Amino acid sequence: MPYDKTPRILIADGKVVARRLYTKLLQQFFPDDLDIMECESGIKAVILCDRKEIDCALVSYNLPDFNAVEFLSRLRERLGTHAFVSVLIIAETEEDEKGAIEAMKLGAFDFLVKGKFSRLSLAQSVKNAVENARLRSELAQSQQRILDTAHRAGMAEIANGVLHNIGNNLNSLNIALDSLQDTAENTRLSGLQRANQLLADMSDLLSQHPKGSGLIQYYQGLEEAFQRENEVILAEVAKVREKINHIRNDVSEQTRYANAELFLEDLDLNTVVKEVINLQQGRLEEGGIEVRTNCNKLPRCKVVRIKLLQILNNLIKNSIESLGDNDVGDRTLIIGTRPDEDEQYAITVTDNGPGISEDNFDKIFHYGYTTKENANGTGLHMAANAAGEMGGRITAANTQDRGCTFTLVMPFVAATPGPS
């Protein structure tokens, strides 16, 4: 489970035996990756969810003080819009099962019926619940960052880029699910079934051996176990795919609102360059990088400021990462501005890193392409898209001695004349 921190699971059940059993089952499936807490009442569970940042609460439908529906109600009252706990309900009776279905309408993630679920299905449900909680939390944080940036900038254009990136990641996740489903549907289970049929046909011969009948039973049990696990995997794939489709619909709806008209501001480009350098100052100092500017005097012009900041931040970030591979003594970054032909201007970002191999020049602006570990390959792609949306372009070229220069060329739009 590849998370930044260990997932925290809360098990709430009035019976200590049940709590210990669920803890043991989950520890067997995730021996090193879960922080499990236990409590015996609903009110303690609500308090722990508030104080301990619980990712998944595994809750018995009937708690000593109230049932799971009341638990959900109190949880929402206490946490409000910050309730990112995914609640899994354990039902025991048919009446509990009906109540659990009602609880799902109030926000429960899923429910399991005692005696009808396996260790694998419990672990898979917990894993999905944790992923759901993390995804909702990250989306909420992203939305808040988007809103803050949009308010400060007076527009919501940055939201479109983030939502576009989320959509691309959802596409990648769907591809992974397709691969998982294909693997599950094309296992060697059919071969095992044919082998078991052959063993059954040879039962008379095998029965002459003292362990022959036991061998047949063993392989038949193995076949049944594989069949059940296969069905669980396919069912979980279907559930995750359904949730992805819900998120995709939300992203599409938000994208409509984010596609606002571009807001042009009257700016001094050299001031914007200084602002970007200040934003990256911490990373530049950490990397021991000397920054020089080569800025020519330019008249004020109309610019979509938030997009220009996005482009320059990505170009400088790329150069900082490249300079991390610099095996020579000094690490230098030069940022310049100059007028360009045909009423355009250019901003250049030059580093003395190892440069770009010839094989990669036609790929560096493609979505997802990267040569760095732990990178997602979206920065240069987003920068190129943002430049294109403003009528400009980005090019890259290796310098004569060492390193690379990225050049942003944009059409010059004169600033609005001030009052005379």
Image (cartoon, rainbow, N blue to C red):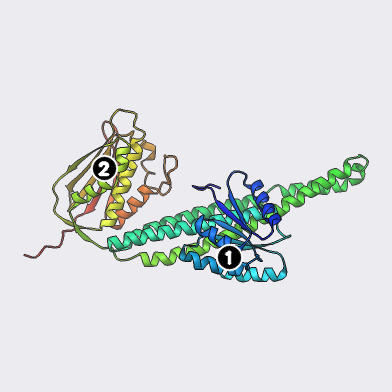
Q: Is residue 32 above or below residue 254?
A: above
For image coordinates 17% across by 56% down, the residue present is 301
* Residue 242 in picture, x, y percent from top left: 56, 62
What residue do we see at 62% from left, 62% from top?
A: 41
Judge from the rendering whether residue 53 lies leftward or rightward of residue 183; answer left or right.
Answer: left
Residue 213 in picture, x, y percent from top left: 88, 45
Q: Nearer the viewer, residue 287 or 415?
A: 287
Q: Residue 108: which numbered mark, if any? A: 1
Q: Where does residue 223 sit, x and y in percent of width and height?
A: 76, 49
Q: Is residue 140 left or right of residue 114?
A: left
Q: CA distance from mark 1 to mark 2?
A: 50 Å
Neighbor class of circle 2 (other Cα within 10 Å; few <14, some 14-19, many 20+) is many
SS under mark 1:
loop
How dense is the environment of label 1, judged by Cα within 10 Å: few (below 14), some, or many (20 and up)? many
Mark count: 2
420 lies left or right of 374? left
Residue type for callout 2: Val
Residue under label 2: 349
